[in-house]
Image: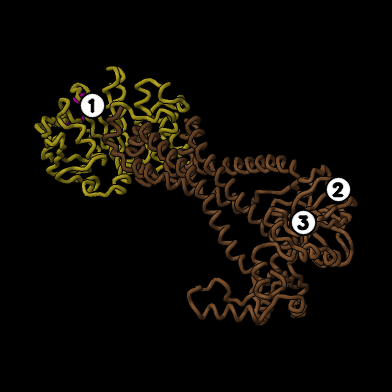
Chain colours: A yellow, B brown
Amino acid sequence: MPVVQTRSLSKTYVVGGVRVGALEDVTLAVGEGRFVAVIGASGSGKSTLLNLLGGLDTPTAGTIEVDGALISSMDREALARYRRHGAGMIFQSFNLVPSRTALENVELPLIFADVDRAERKRRAAELLDRVGLAARAGHRPAELSGGEQQRVAVARALANGPRLLLADEPTGNLDSRTSREIVGLLAELNRVRNLTVIMVTHEEGLAREFAHDVVRLRDGRIVATEGVR
Amino acid sequence: MRFSDAAGFALASLRKRRLRTFLTASGVTIGIGALVCMISFGKGMQKNVTRAFESADLFNSIMVMPGGPSEPAADPDEPGARRAVRAARSGAVLDDAAVAAIARIPGVVSAYPDVNFPALVGLEGEEEFRLVQVVPAAVAASPAVRIKWGRTYTTDDEAGVIVSSSFLRRLGAKDPAAAVGKTLRITSVSFDLGKLVSLDLTKLFAGGGLPVAQEHYDFPVLGVTEMTVFGEGGPGLGQNDVFLPPGPARGIKKLPITSVWDVFRMAEGGPGHSAVSVKLGSLRELEAVKSKVREMGFSTFALADQFDEITKAFFFMDMILAAVGMIAIVVAALGIVNTMVMSILERFREIGVMKAVGAGDGDIRGIFFFESGAIGLLGGAAGCLLGWATSLLINRIVNIYLARQGVPYVEYFAFPLWIFLGAMGFSLLVSLVSGIYPARRAARVDPVVALRHD
């Protein structure tokens, strides 16, 4: 049974009175512990797909199931709970809170999950250590390199122990060496923790090097699915 | 999300934008300060007036006037009413016998006619036209007459007067205490009967003057009354400047009239007094005494009956003062809304991030509510201090100014604890209400849009 299952998923935006289809009839199944790369040109609907899977956006039609829960019909509060516990997300622009230190950024999801202060600090420090940033815990995002910031974002995405990690162009703002390190980290977490990873990217090389499956999107539709390994 | 965490988020945000927090809270401070000032002034006035009434025994007094209870306001076109008036007038004359009868009613401590006559009153060459009040010794010794310097007269026949310090000031006396023992000259006017007999009408019409005589009477000043802002201490509410005991007053030749009404009353053949002041032992006797006096055919006026009206008047005064303060509060509330909406725009992306990592609508609302509430509490606390300090300052300035006019020190503002607690509670309430719209708007932020936002 797949961890993520979408059926006939569609998302249509209305821009200036004109309906623009961002995603059309996407049916996708991702098994537990898989590392799936979604590849496509910009505008192909890959970020839309990821926002829908992460519970940030709601589909126009079709269904999404994660771990057996029907995400596509959840209300706002249930979606917030899902984002808190069910799926971790990382982004191209890291999206750390600038006024908070690395440790405090990792604490953020734990705060919304009502974890008490001492436990929060302990878990956040452990996660920073896990991504190799224990020494940088007290630094603010502006004092960290791009790669370090993305590691903080990864630690934050894992704070409440989700089984699904969604990465939206995680290497878009990084040089090629750092990009390999970050995708390598995701692959390692996938392997060691049996974490299901869905990564949107346009770097085919990285996708082929680390992912199990590659899904190709064009104009909002899946055009090909191939098992790399 | 825990309460302490919401507090932490909000306080961190307020600290980060110190100047704006300070300016927004200042708006609340001024509004709450104005409100505290206004309400404490209203309460101070009420306290002072109530106390002045109590100390002057005004609640325990009844004014008795001639005429039945229905006289004279009834519709003049209604014959029945006119008959009632006539009956009352023919029946009851407020003469000395009636005063004595009223004094015998159980519960009445004293009853004395409200007698006054116009006279020129002079001290050391300066003189002014005044109404001289004839007041028995029992009343002059009561708290109704507030002697500050010297003493009151001890018997109704003692030859001596009590004057007010404000009148002494008008006569040019610098130190009211020094006036005790000096001689006050009362010059009264009366009809000269001798002249009246040989009245030469042609002379009168030619402008020769009325057949009047002037007589001088000298009395030592025994006491000087204290001046208060709420009227010179004396019976009744008017300005009473010269008090004379009944004994010497009888020896003074004077015009029996003080107003045109007295002339009318004389024409109807009803001599007697225009009013009688009645002092009661306690307020409890009020209704019983009032009904007895009415049975005798007189009308009554009791200030105690009016006190509900006075209380109502103070309530309206408080409302008006509060409304003035409210204007500032409304402006402050708009300031909070503006600041919070600005805060949402600045933290648009941060709100998106918080939602992406699992913040619910309620969490975001809580953070923003806490933020506006903190501004309200901060501004409210500072406003209490500001209002209190401003009131003390105004009180001081007014007292310095009035001290030059001889008015003793008065606390014009009252600060019951509930004013401050109420002001704090109110500013918190206003700030939370101001936070409703921004908090809802923040909670409704679409994370997809916010994260795309730069």
| Alpha-carbon span between mark 2 and mark 1 | 106 Å
For disc 3, the marked residue is B119
Q: Mark 2 lies on which chain?
A: B
Q: Which residue is depicted at the point 34% across and 22% down?
A: A147
Is residue B233 something that shows in the picture? Answer: no
Q: Residues within 10 Å of mark 1 (few under 14, many from 20)?
A: some
For disc 1, the marked residue is A210
Foreground: disc 2 or disc 1: 2
| Alpha-carbon span between mark 2 and mark 3 | 24 Å
Foreground: disc 2 or disc 3: 3
Is residue A150 something that shows in the picture? Answer: yes
Q: Is residue A210 magenta?
A: yes
Indicate the quadrant where residue B205 lies. bottom right
- Looking at the picture, tell me which residue is in the foreground, B293 or B396: B293
Q: Which residue is depicted at the point 43% across and 48% down?
A: B433
Q: In this view, does B95 lie above or below B37?
A: below
Q: Is residue A42 above or below residue B163?
A: above
Q: Which residue is depicted at the point 22% across and 39% down?
A: A52
> In the image, what residue type sits under mark 1?
Phe
Label for residue B177?
2
Judged left or right of residue B128, residue B353 is left
> In the image, what residue type sits under mark 2?
Ala
Foreground: disc 3 or disc 1: 3
Judged left or right of residue B31, residue B280 is right
| Alpha-carbon span between mark 3 and mark 1 | 117 Å
Q: How crowded is mark 2: few (under 14 residues within 10 Å), some or many (20 or more)?
A: some
